[in-house]
Amino acid sequence: MPHIAKRKSNKQGPVLDKSGIPYNYIVVIDAGSKGSRAYVYNWLDPESLVSADEDKGPAPRVELLKRIDINAKDGTKDDTDDEDNDNDTKEDDSDEDSEDDEVENQENKPPSKEDTDNNKSEANGIAKGDQKVTKMDVPVITTEKNWRKKIKPGLSAYKDKPKKVGSKHIKYLLDAVSDVVPESQQSRTPVFLHATAGMRLLTPREQEEVLKTTCDYISQKYNFYLPDCASHMNIIDGEVEGLYGWIAMNYLMNTFQDSSATYGLLDMGGASTQISFQPNQEEATEHSSALYNIKLGPGLDYGIFCASFLGYGINQAHNKYIDTLKEQAESTGAGNGGIIHDPCLPKGLIKDDDPQVEGSGDFEQCMKLMYPLLTSTEHSETSSCSTNEPQEVSSCLLSDSIPSFDFNVDRFVGVSGYWDAISHLLKFEDIKSGGAYSYEAFSTETKRVCEMTWTELDKLNNRDNDDTNALSDLTDTDLKQLCFKSSWVLSVLHRGLGFPALGSDTADSDKPLSVTTLVNGYEFTWTLGRAVLYASSEYARAIYGDEFEVGYFKGTSPNVFVNGAEVKGVAARPAFSESKDGSQNNIDTQNEVTGGEADSTEDTWITISDHRMYGSLSFLALLLVVLYLLFGKSKRKTIVDAFKRVFSKKTILDLRPKYKPLRSLEMPRDALELDDMLRAEEATAEFEIDDDSDELSDDGLDIAPR
């Protein structure tokens, strides 16, 4: 798993590790509703590892398939720089710029020998001596904080102008990625673009045009491995997004070694919300057809339930809420030039919409208006949700086809929208890593801010951080929507998903939900789950050949197996091959940076010499033009006539060595005198020009290799 440590700045990734083993790279683009993010990951090439291991003797041991101990049990934190972490986690989605380049001078630190040895002894099923490998652990995947790029708006914004998606969107992402992935590795580095909720809302034709244009642009402009547009550039449904997220979360939480202790994931975006978890054995048996069966390696099999609720993300929910207010206003006549009163908007705040909206700041009414939004068509017959009177705890988003939660055992982590809303109101000891969620504390704080006037709320937002009641620094837009977002998260958690309303008298260890933006010190993103699947598939193929496949299938379609790497019928990434001259100028080191610096002085000088030569020729041509224009009209005519004479067929045939007397040529004397004069003028002009040219040539030769 990623292990990030302070290092010198080195944006470009290494080609080889210190032992000469090449890295494999992958690029995964999360094309979300609000923007796109490109991430780069790498891991040691398993084919090279196996080959190197087999050379050691008759009893091979694949020694690098180990998990790094992240000290999750004793609570020790990674030794990372606070300022860098701050930059990493504070991502301002209100930024109006079209792109936001995050470059931070932190990089991965390979596990120390002591860490590796400890993991060797603790990992179950790792081959020792001539024992058979019965369980394959997940491979070590690394990334850096400056190996990513994000841009706004989202891909769906190009539905009406798909031809611009390449130059206005994809270019900024892949130009940055090209600076990270070594050029020698790009042709074997797969690039995936998986679009999520924003693109799901487009028509099929709009989706096809945007994705096709994207794939064509990448294929034509870049050298990444893109063998199949359908599997590399696509829209993934919410369940698959949740599946990738679950893999990423449990990879970071280091739980794959003990399948009974996995974490569920709650993820809320702008357009949808997802839930992914591993049900207990009884529920898994009862709902086996609804589960995704994941195979990460021998002994790493999981039955996971994933559900996505499109339209229940923060932004889409707010749109539905505003529509509800307008419908109510029209039914009461307030829509005809009147004012709509919004109970989720701060008191005294007026929005100049049509019709005009004024905040009334009523928490109870705000929660009551949200309740009908939770009752989707699919689950509207649920008895607990058939009334307009909200219950404190209900499961309006769930149905009998969904496995029940066991809150005595199940543990969940809330990210994205859950973290944003809750962290704005609750004060965690570690503001980056979050902590246990308390219904009592969050509902109390939500009620408090919902019933404030706009003036009070704005003042509280700008007070010193020493004030225990102060808010985080929020933009005006976030501040206006603070009550709505917090109320919506409360509604989804307790009235939609049925999370218990536990108070402060419940120990944190007994609370089923924690919220965070950093998981054990690392930023959460579902793209890591996609990388884990790809890497695990390559390792399994290198070790077991075709005997074991990594991937997943759904219980309803057991014969449709989705490979973790390339889909069936698509070739695996090309094998690594060294450069033609056998040199590698980018080797991974733990304490120093050599990437991006040319090891070959000769190659560097040749490149510079070529540039000087082009410059000299350009200068010479310009000088000739200037000199020609400086001559008078008659002089220019004389020069033109001289050039004609020099390059005429007769003159060329008459060229003789200078030591031969001119009078031996039987020509009239007046013709000879004119010819002598023209040749003298040519010689003078050529000498003057050649003198400048020689100086430029000498300058170029001074830096050229000998």
Image (cartoon, grey):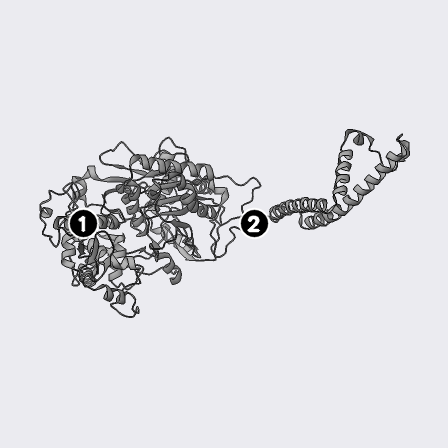
Asked if disc 2 and disc 1 are in contact, CB closer than 8 Å, the reply is no
Image coords of residue 242 (percent x, y): 27, 45
Find numbered disc 2 in the image and state the secondary structure of the residue it sits on.
loop
Rendering coords of residue 55 (x, y %): 47, 41
Nearer to me, 667 or 11 = 667
Check disc 1 and report the residue beneath it.
326
Q: Is residue 313 above or below residue 652?
A: below
SS under mark 1: helix
Please provide percent x and percent y for residue 116.
39, 52
Q: Earlier in the sequence, mark 2 or mark 1?
A: 1
- The answer to which image quadrant residue 647 occupies is top right
Question: Marks 2/1: CA distance?
Answer: 64 Å
Q: Would residue 59 be seen by someone viewing this image from the given angle?
A: no
Question: As displayed, is residue 549 above or below residue 41?
Answer: above
Locate residue 458 relative to residue 606 in the image: left or right: left
* Side of 301 relative to 607 (left or right): left
Residue at left 10%, top 50%? 388
Locate residue 475, reporting x and y percent: 31, 59
Residue sitting nearer the eye, 116 or 650: 650
- Location of residue 296 by image quarter: top left
Q: Nearer the viewer, residue 586 or 130?
A: 586
Q: Is residue 663 visible?
A: yes
Label 1 crowd bin: few (<14), some (14–19), many (20+), radius 10 Å: some
Which residue sits at x=78%, y=34%?
645
* Three-letter code for the amino acid on which mark 1 is drawn: Lys
Residue at numbered disc 2: 598
